[in-house]
Amino acid sequence: MSRSEFDDIRAYVADETTHAGDLLSVARDLIDDLERARLREAALRSYYLRLLTAARATVAAEMVGAPDPLAFLKHELAERGQLPLDGDAVHRILSDARAAEALLACLEQNPPGRPRSSRARTCVGTSRSLPR
């Protein structure tokens, strides 16, 4: 949920003309959103842990001279459908990795600051509609 959506919800809840039934409906929607976010986070944590474990096993296998040290990582990527299938995919993946590395290096050197503006903030979130 975007910052703008949070601002819209806060304004709606603070409005004295909002009826209790409408607030209950908003609360139910927010609880549903929170549960979906919790499930997404749990899935991402699981994927991250599996990938980290595969990466560590790959490095350990290389250190002991295993015949196919990338087997752990290849297996994990194959399960997620993330193995490159042809030469074009390989070149695109390497290009994406180089671009991401350059972008991260640039961001680390020049962290983005908050824009300073004299304009008043406006809420423009459109993905959540509040009852009226």
Image (tube, rainbow, N blue to C red):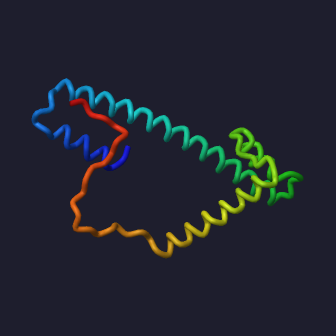
Q: Residue furthest left?
A: 16
Q: Residue 126, image x and y in percent?
A: 34, 42
Q: Residue at x 22, y 68 (%)?
A: 118
Quadrant of the drawing holding the C terminus: top left
Q: Residue 30, image x and y in percent?
A: 33, 34
Q: Is residue 112 left or right of residue 29?
A: right
Note whether 94 is above or below 129 in the view shown.
below
Q: Residue 64, image x and y in percent?
A: 83, 57
State which quadrant residue 35 falls in. top left
Q: Is residue 8 left or right of residue 53?
A: left
Q: Residue at x 26, y 26 (%)?
A: 25
State which quadrant residue 121 falls in. bottom left
Quadrant of the drawing holding the N terminus: top left
Note whether 52 is above or below 130 in the view shown.
below
Q: How many numbered discs, if any?
A: 0
Of 32 and 122, nearer the camera is 122
Q: Residue at x 76, y 43 (%)?
A: 75
Q: Residue furthest right?
A: 67
Note whether 119 is above or below 85 in the view shown.
below
Q: Residue at x 31, y 44 (%)?
A: 5
Q: Is residue 45 left or right of residue 123?
A: right
Of 61 and 30, nearer the camera is 30
Q: Residue furthest top?
A: 21
Note whether 92 is above or below 104 in the view shown.
above
